[in-house]
């Protein structure tokens, strides 16, 4: 995900806007990520610390990402303890993109 060419051709986000979107994901991960798991090969589960505006922020970012990268499926859930859970899935052809997202989430500071 460091390389501007990591995005597949099916991504419709203009190339010049991609670093800004990556920075949004980085900030979310750096500020809120509490857990990360791969419950299945084509699925990623992110636990994010809740708080004022966090759910809306996650939903907005996921909606915009899904708008330009239609191969992603995002499901946002707020748990009983206030954690915001983001489930991300892709099809087999985009598993490498999910791997890149998981790596970035695991250590967003190292990716900058």
Image (cartoon, rainbow, N blue to C red):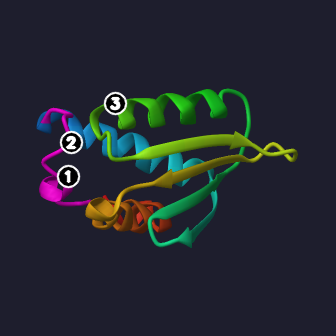
Find residue 7 and name its label: 1
Q: Secondary structure at mark 2?
A: loop
Disc 2 to disc 3: CB gap under 8 Å: no
Which residue has dot 2 on it? 11
**Image coords of residue 45 (percent x, y):** 58, 59
**Image coords of residue 21 (percent x, y):** 32, 39
Find residue 77 and name its label: none
Identify the residue at image location x=29%, y=60%: 94
Distance from label 3 to label 1 (Cα)? Answer: 14 Å
Which residue has dot 3 on it? 67
The residue lying toward the viewer, choosing from 10 and 20, is 10
Mark 2 Cα shell of 10 Å, populated few (<14), some (14-19), many (≥20): some
* Left or right: where 102 falls relative to 82: left
**Image coords of residue 100 (percent x, y):** 33, 64
Mark 1 Cα shell of 10 Å, populated few (<14), some (14-19), many (≥20): some
Mark 3 Cα shell of 10 Å, populated few (<14), some (14-19), many (≥20): some
């Amino acid at each position: 995900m460091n390389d501007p060419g990591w995005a597949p051709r099916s991504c419709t986000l203009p190339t010049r806007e991609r670093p800004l979107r990556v920075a949004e994901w980085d900030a979310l991960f750096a500020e809120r990520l509490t857990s990360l798991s791969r419950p299945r090969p084509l699925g990623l589960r992110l636990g994010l610390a809740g708080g004022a505006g966090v759910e809306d922020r996650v939903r907005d970012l996921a909606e915009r990402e899904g708008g330009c990268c239609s191969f992603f499926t995002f499901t946002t859930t707020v748990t009983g303890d206030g954690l915001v859970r983001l489930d991300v899935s892709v099809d087999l052809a985009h598993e490498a993109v999910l791997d890149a997202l998981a790596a970035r989430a695991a250590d967003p500071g190292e990716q900058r």
